[in-house]
Image (cartoon, coloured by chain):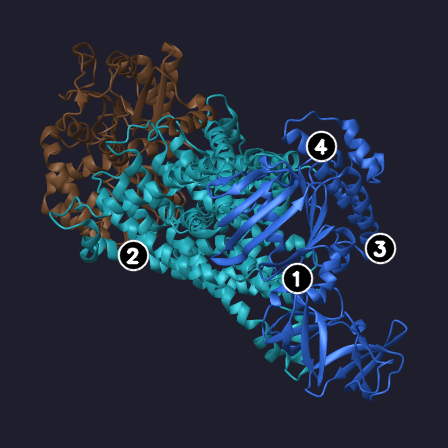
Amino acid sequence: MPSELSEGLQIQSLRVELGGRAVLADVNLCQETGTYACLLGESGSGKSTLLATIAGLIRPQQGKVSIHGQVVSKDKTFLPPERREIGMVFQDAALWPHMSILDNVLYPLRARRLAVEKSRAMALLERMAIPTAAARRRPHELSGGQQQRVAIARAIIAKPRIVLLDEPLSALDHGVRENLREFLHGLFAEEGITALHVTHDPGEAFYLGRRVGVLNGGHLEQWDTPERLYQQPASLVVARLGGSVRAIQVPVLESRDKEAVLQWEGQRWTVPAASELQSASQATLLLRPSDLELDEAPTAAPEAQVRHAHWHDGQYLLTLQASDGQEFLAYSRQGDLGPRRWQLRRGQGWCIPLQSSANH
Amino acid sequence: MKRLMLALLGLGLASAAHAATLTLYSAAPATLARTLAADFEKKTGDHVEVWTSSTGKVMARLAAEANHPHADVVMVAGWSAGLDLAQQGMVYPYHPADIEKALVKPAQVSAPFLPYGLDTVSMVFNTKALPKGAKLPDSWFDLTQPQWKDRITAPNPLLSGTASSFLTAFVDQYGNKAWKFLSELKANGTVWPGTNHAALLPVMSGERSGMFECVGHAAVAAKAQGNSIVQVFPKEGTIMIPRPILILKSAPDKKLAEQFVNFAMSPAGQKLVAKNNLYPARQGVPAKPIMNKMGSFKVMSVNWSQMAAKQPAILARFKKEILGQ
Amino acid sequence: MTRVVNHLLVYLILGVLVLAPLGAIVYEALQPGAGHQHGVALLQLGVDQHFLDSLSGTLGMAGFAVLFALPMGFALAMLMYYVPPRWTPFWEALILIPFLIPPYLTAEAWSLLVGPVGMIEQVIGFLGSSLEGFLFSLAGMGMMMALHLTPLVYILLRAALDNGNPRLLQAARVHGASALAAFRLGILPTLLTALAAAGLLVFMDTSAEFGVPALLAGYAGVQVLSTSIEGATNVWPVNLPMASAIGLVLCAMGVLVWFLYRPLVRNNEGQIQRRAPARSVWWSILPIAVFVLVGTIMPVLAVLAISLEKAMTAGLQASNFTWEHYHHIFSNSSSGFAALLTSLKISALVAVFGMASALLAANLVRRGGRIGALVDLLGTLPMAVPGVVLAVGMILFWNAPWNQLPVFGHPIILAVAYATVTFPFALRYARTGLAQIPPRLEQAGRVHGASPLRTALGIQVPLVWPMLVGGATVVFALSMRELVASLMLQPAGMQVISTYIYGNFRQGVIGNGMALSVIGIFSSALILGLARKALIRR
């Protein structure tokens, strides 16, 4: 099938246990060749383990990993890392301190017995904005940002089938990080390199990834475009990555194709809904501040108490408490505490199956 | 894999092992064994590996290696130790008549091996370290006097071949009187710290005054260095101990071993024996002038083959009663 | 594949070095003893008066060593920490030197110093004779070991003091504790743990010691287990089951103490806190200088002096001076020089081979799991196994009728023995080295196309190189000084430096032995210095 061929990376029902504890369970994802994807998750979510498993540094208990259509890990099959034709960038650059910059970059060519073209390495370093004179120096003589650029050069010089990046920017200072982020974006798009980038920074993931996966507690919660992650999150965890959000538990009156009719604060609301909602009687309504209208709310609208207000981005961000005690956020031009009328904007909000986690 | 590892290890030590070599286990003075080996090498071009220790340890090692024998030629200090090995059937008889004829009188003892030299035992004193007002004794039995309390050492007969030979002869001669003397000696604070040298060292350094049944060559060597050491031959007499050189049955190259024994018994070899403060076994080779002339002190007569039979029981009793082991 | 080879190699190395001799000992100890008609040798020990005497000798010697070493090490550590003299590093180096001098040499030197015509008496005219009685006793033997081991106590206690968090002390003071109460709260607990650990270590090392009792016990009229084992193995009539049984008891003592010791030092790896340097005080030099005098200066001077004297009893006079012993060592056919060369060769070989094996083993230990823990245990076990027991085990194993490998009677057996004795130290250095490289550096190698072997040789070895060289120098130094296994295992035709010195001392040719001691100490220090300089760049 043609679609199979364009799969740069495919993972099916992957399960990894470390020390008897499941670190990854039932992970499935499929990444197109030549695209940049990101894996987002907090520390301990299993994202680095997933990367190490793809690299062949960890042997999974179950599941299948294939790179460019070649199965590298399934049942008894397990290709050692050196035969997977991949490149990798680590959080702390992981340049070998006993080799020069140039030797670091040339290492993948030597190790794979490919033609050792110094000129190409030098050109690559130049492209990474590493001064030519630095090529003979040792890694510790370069700045953190420069070291990471060298590590990127090392990862791509042997034209790997996929480049894995494990938090490559998080050890860097803020300014350097933004700069390198842009650089990565341009470079990988230009070269058409398949890349999987692990990070805990949603901004970074949304900036770089054509697709973004969200890992939580060893589960891949969602694997989607950044837009859909924001607008149609599969869970509260995913929704939080897109910005401030509150989860409200509400009864469902009726659920249709892509909508649900909810009953809350004495009113019926028609809200976009995930197809998994089906005919559940309760649902979690995810509300971002921009989903609500306060200043233009009609007099018939329900009332809530403003508990807290602070100046934020040119307007007030209010914390409101509904009559059933549940809290939500909204923007307004006024910051007074006390009762306010509110309503849900048409087509805003997002309804998912009931999640146990409480508001914040 | 193990062989490969051994081979690799062996590379670094290649100089230590050769193909055609003679292995000598010796309880003779270390320098004698080494110079004999070196001169033999110079003369014949054959290599000699030497391991030197005390008689007791040479005997132990020969027993331990019964399964994988390493030694070809053995030199021990006591004649009875040689007879013991012969009794165990380990000795390849070699005592050509022409060499036996050339031996000095006290060395003419019938055995399946040859004596390479002779030695005595005596009392030894450090004249600088005598107790105040003490005179040198002239009898073995004087050493139990209170003035020698904690001042005397003795070699351990389990280690020293000459001491074990003397002990056997002494017990043979005096019976229960000898055992009583030994236990009194012990009660008087005498220690048996090890070999002759180990026992002589505190005497040389003055920590102790004197030594019981000290082997002659060690005392002479200490004297020759300029230490204030005197040998005393008691009136009861001492014994003249031939020191055996013997070839083991397990030696693969008997010709080479015989050559070595011949060399040790030759005038050149006997000169080395004399140089190391032993009485040469061969007539016509003089002992060092510093040594007491043979005949100038009294010697007890010894029946060696009888003694060899009695020795194990005497040593066992000594080990238990005197050393408490 | 590479991994399987790595595993097999490590099993083979540990099997040959550790399991084979220990297994042989256990097997032999369960045989009937030579002097008895029935029952296994191990059970006959209980009614053997000689064994009980030796056991009490060993316990006494080790007890005295602990009794002397702990207060000395404690005093030195407290002085150097709270009221250091000027030029602290200089004094610290002097305090540590006795640990570098092999204990048998310290004992030899002291036995030359004391006595009515010993060097002390020769120089100051008194004290020598009264010290003699002390040296040739259980307490004297314990003292010799204490001199050797006090630096170790000092190091452990200093580490405990340095590890104490000064903030805890400050917090205690701020909240109303007196200086003494703050000390009790913030420092005493770690200090007590360190004292316990140091005491166990001194006990273990002393009870395993052979050289010092071999030299002194005979004169003291006492017996200890290590020399009994050597006697039962090396002196006719031989009783190997008895030797093994005593060895097993000694070994069990060591292992027991070691298991008590290990947990005490494990959590002692805290960050060293730098605190404001203490005010230096002149009077703290006095006690420190006394230790340095007794532990370092006097023995070293005695060795030097004897190496330059014609006759020991003639004393320190111009007419008694000679270079003869040094001439003798450097003369062509000298067995002393040959012994030095042999020692250098074997020690260098063991340093290289030992560190390579230790690196292989450390890789397994790092991988963790049950196998890692087992490799760690076996690799560090020789710490608790006395050299004399190991030597008996090696004789039993390599000289067994069925063992056709030509190891016993070949110089290689010394290399094998040294490798076993030094393995725990090699393993510790290799592990520290590996712990210092982030695993990512090696993962980066694998991910970018290097095979495990290539990663090991091209990335791991260069990165742990300084630690490998450091470990190799320690292994080298320990191999150069090893005495008891050398004595019991050395084949015909060769000597090593320690057996030459010991043998000459016992044969009364003291000057040559002392001259070789001087040459040996200087040459190995020089070689180690040059090797370190050449091998560690940057």
Disc nearest the viewer among 3 and 2:
3
Kindly identify the amino acid type of the residue bearing the numbered disc 2: Leu
| Tag 3 residue | A175
Which of the 4 image quarters holds residue C190? bottom right
**Which chain is tinted cyan?**
C
Q: Is residue A254 above or below residue A98?
A: below
Q: Are both tags, 3 and 1, on one chain?
A: yes
Question: Label 1, label 4: how many angstroms apart (C-alpha)?
Answer: 34 Å
| Tag 1 residue | A42
Q: Colour of chain A?
A: blue
Asked if the residues shown at circle 3 and circle 1 are in contact, with their CB atoms under 8 angstroms apart, the answer is: no
Q: Earlier in the sequence, mark 1 or mark 4?
A: 1
Q: Is residue C18 above or below residue C258?
A: above
Question: Label 2, label 1: how many angstroms apart (C-alpha)?
Answer: 62 Å
Kindly identify the amino acid type of the residue bearing the numbered disc 4: Leu
Disc nearest the viewer among 3 and 1:
1
Q: Position of residue B210 (x, y in %)?
A: 31, 44
The chain containing the residue under callout 4 comes to A
Q: Earlier in the sequence, mark 4 or mark 3?
A: 4
Q: Secondary structure at mark 4?
A: helix
**Which chain is tinted brown?**
B
Q: Secondary structure at mark 2?
A: helix
Q: Crowdedness of circle 3 by 10 Å Cα count: few (<14), some, many (20+)?
A: few
Disc nearest the viewer among 2 and 1:
1
Q: Position of residue C269 (x, y in %)?
A: 57, 60
The residue at the point 49 percent across, 39 percent down is: A77
- Quarter of the image that includes the C terminus of chain A: bottom right
Question: Label 4, label 3: how many angstroms apart (C-alpha)?
Answer: 29 Å
| Tag 2 residue | C55
The chain containing the residue under callout 3 comes to A
